[in-house]
Image (cartoon, helix red, strand yellow):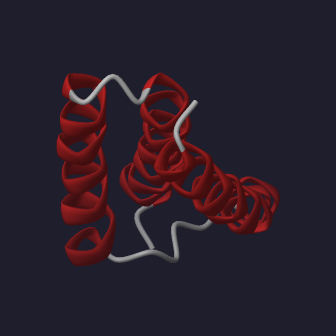
Amino acid sequence: MIWQDAVITGANILFSISLIPQIHYGFKNKVGPIRYQTSIPTTLGLIAISIALFSLSLYLSTALTGLSAILWFTLFIQKVIYKT
């Protein structure tokens, strides 16, 4: 593993962990507090970054960036379902 993969992976772990309370809050309170203008571009950007990381053979970073994209997509889905 090259050092860049470790750094990107570590950052994405922190990003993912920080999103979990927000997702839990949304499900618990039946609200979608994140705006579409935030969740859609962030999800699409993270998917694009994941593809780029995969093309560089940074597989651990690819997986964790993909996880972050899924978490942001979950926030988008909460906004659609709960319509707040």
Q: Quadrant of the N terminus?
A: top right
Q: Is residue 18 above or below residue 48?
A: below
Query: Residue 24, how many percent across, how many down?
Result: 79, 57
- Front-most of residues 83 and 47: 47
Residue at image coords 21%, 55%: 45
Query: Residue 60, how many percent across, how many down?
Result: 55, 29
Q: Is residue 77 above or below residue 20?
A: above
Residue at image coords 40%, 63%: 83
Q: Answer with the quarter of the image where residue 55 lies.
A: top left
Q: Answer with the quarter of the image where residue 38 lies.
A: bottom left
Residue at image coords 62%, 64%: 15
Number of numbered discs overlaid on the protein picture:
0
Residue at image coords 50%, 57%: 82
Q: Is residue 62 left or right of residue 7?
A: left
- Front-most of residues 13 and 20: 13
Query: Residue 6, how many percent across, how many down?
Result: 62, 47
Q: Is residue 73 left or right of residue 51?
A: right
Q: Is residue 21 above or below residue 64?
A: below
Q: Quadrant of the C terminus?
A: bottom left
